[in-house]
Image (spheres, coloured by chain):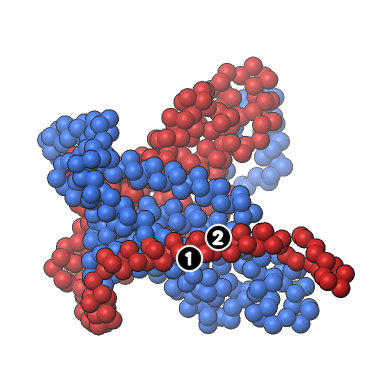
Chain colours: A red, B blue
Amino acid sequence: MPVSTSPQGQPQWRLRTTKAQWLGYLAWLAGISLFLLCWKVISDNTMWVFVEDAGRQGTDLISRMLPPEWTYAHQLWLPMWDTLNIATLGTALGIMMAFPVAFLAARNTSPHPLIRSLALTIIVSSRSINSLIWAMLLVTILGPGVLAGIIAIALRSIGFVGKLLYEAIEEIHPTPVEAIAATGASRMQVMSYGVLPQVLPAFAGISVYRWDINIRESTVLGLVGAGGIGLQLNASINSLAWDQVSVIFVMIFATVLVSEWISAKVRHAII
Amino acid sequence: MKLTEAALSEQRQKAAQAGRWRRLPLIQSPFLRLALWVGLVVYLILALSSVEVNWARVAEGAGRGLEFLAAFTRPDFISRWDDIWAGLLESLTMTVTSTVIGVALAVPVGLGAARNIAPLPVYWVCRGIIAVSRTFQEVIIAILFVVMFGFGPFAGMITLAFATIGFMAKLLAEDIEDLDERQVEAVRATGAGWWQTLNHAVQPQVMPRLIGLSMYRLDINFRESAVIGIVGAGGIGATLNTSINRYEYDTSAAVLLIIIAIVLLSEYSSSFVRRWTQ
């Protein structure tokens, strides 16, 4: 914290030095310029007639959605079950694949730096690509259906679970590991008795958390043909049956709230 | 009969001395463990039986899968470069504007959703906004906004900003609820008003985390901007969607590689910015 002297010879306290203050102003100026530049690109690519009309379109949309066609809900149980299966089986498959990857990616358990960087590449590429893109690719390869959705969710989950898990592995206590190694245990024994018990609660917590996220993600996979309630959503939107769309929304909202509650409960119980 | 903690540990000691040591299970109650296993098996049978696989179709698609993997060895940046560049520019601009707008709107909502500084009615309204914004996938919100605002990056920007509000406001509110009360009391004891308390006691405590989270959200928004193009909300997703539908896997591979590169870049730069601000 700089202190400058006033002309009267009295010391004055200031939060920042002049240089730091100017740098701060410059950062703000650069940020605002960038924002305005980006805004210009977007506004050039926008049909403003439609935007002006948005309020009317919005009220029109809501008036079509209300009242929801509740009888439609009976046709949604099966797609909802599919959605749950996509999320759950996808998470299970994903964490099975993420588990070894995380151990290879953690600095303290990785056998070789080269393998470590390979594992980190897997984690980053899986995290960068949204499950919807994975689903789009898999639908062209496997054909439409639940299976494409499950694999899409699994491939996406590897990165998330892998990243959080390898960070947890890197943060473990080294003493139990050394104690087990000192008894003459083999590499696998050290893993299973020294490392694993320390990361198992974190692993379970991360998995449940990812499952909760996957429920949300799996609701839209149907839009590209990968099964679940998204298929119904797509059909209803394409036929402009907005009163059915609102039923689907209510259903998704309820499911996500329940899954969030379950996930929070389980994580509290474990950690 | 339920065993006490001490008796259990004594039992374990004896077992260990007899050479029959077992690792402590994650779930203590053996009954609960069995029930979980049975439930899991029943669920797996039910769930797996609902998965229908058309093996003929899979065999047909397997070739396409290999072709796609092979495309990563020879990504084609050139033949569709104009489309890729336009989509990329739209995605990047959408990311920046939506993050700025979203964070600006998330701050008041986050303040309102913190139980220790907001009155109860405001708290419930803000929590409601957060719940709605967090429940629905960006893609679903994008569909609605495309209907309202027309095709193009504007709808995408609003979608991402809306999603940002829920994410940032929730984490900000949790942060404010966890903050050090002593500093707030100290500032309040000087006779400061609500705004002054906010400015001098709350803001300095949450600012570093707010900046860190904004950088993280910038990263997420870019990744999401790559998918909302599928439903017509602008960005690189539209380019990707077209190239996959046309089976131009070389171009798709190029787009995916660009996305991965930008995510990597933003991850490194965000960790740099976070270190600089803290």
Q: Position of residue B258 (x, y in %)?
A: 34, 43
Q: Amino acid at mark 1?
A: Ile
* Marks 2/1: CA–CA distance: 9 Å
Q: Residue at x 32, y 63 (%)?
A: A41
The chain letter for the residue carrying disc 1 is: A
Per the image, the residue denoted by label 1 is A32
Residue A259 or residue B165, whichever sits in front: B165
Q: Residue at x 56, y 47 (%)?
A: B272
Q: How packed is label 2: few (under 14 Cα within 10 Å), some, or many (20 or more)?
A: few
The chain letter for the residue carrying disc 2 is: A
Q: Considering only order in the chain, which callout, 1 or 2, is on the residue closer to the N terminus? A: 2
Question: Number of numbered discs present?
Answer: 2
Per the image, the residue denoted by label 2 is A27
Q: Position of residue B51 (x, y in %)?
A: 23, 44
Could you tell whether A239 is left or right of A37 in the image? left
Judge whether B236 appears above or below A28 on screen. above
Furthest residue in direction front, as rendered: A7
Judge whether B195 appears above or below B253 on screen. below
Q: Residue at x 43, y 64 (%)?
A: A35
Which quadrant: the C terminus of chain B? bottom right
Q: Secondary structure at mark 1?
A: helix
Residue B97 or residue A82, whichever sits in front: B97
Q: Quadrant of residue A155?
A: top left
Q: Is residue B119 visible?
A: yes
Judge whether B136 appears above or below A59 on screen. above
Q: Residue at x 21, y 31 (%)?
A: B66
Could you tell whether B101 is left or right of B56 in the image? right
Please say if the residues under marks 2 and 1 sit with CB atoms less than 8 Å apart. Answer: no
Q: Amino acid at mark 2?
A: Ala
Judge whether B158 appears above or below B240 on screen. below
Could you tell whether A20 is left or right of A229 in the image? right
Q: Identify the mark at residue B64; answer none if there is no mark.
A: none
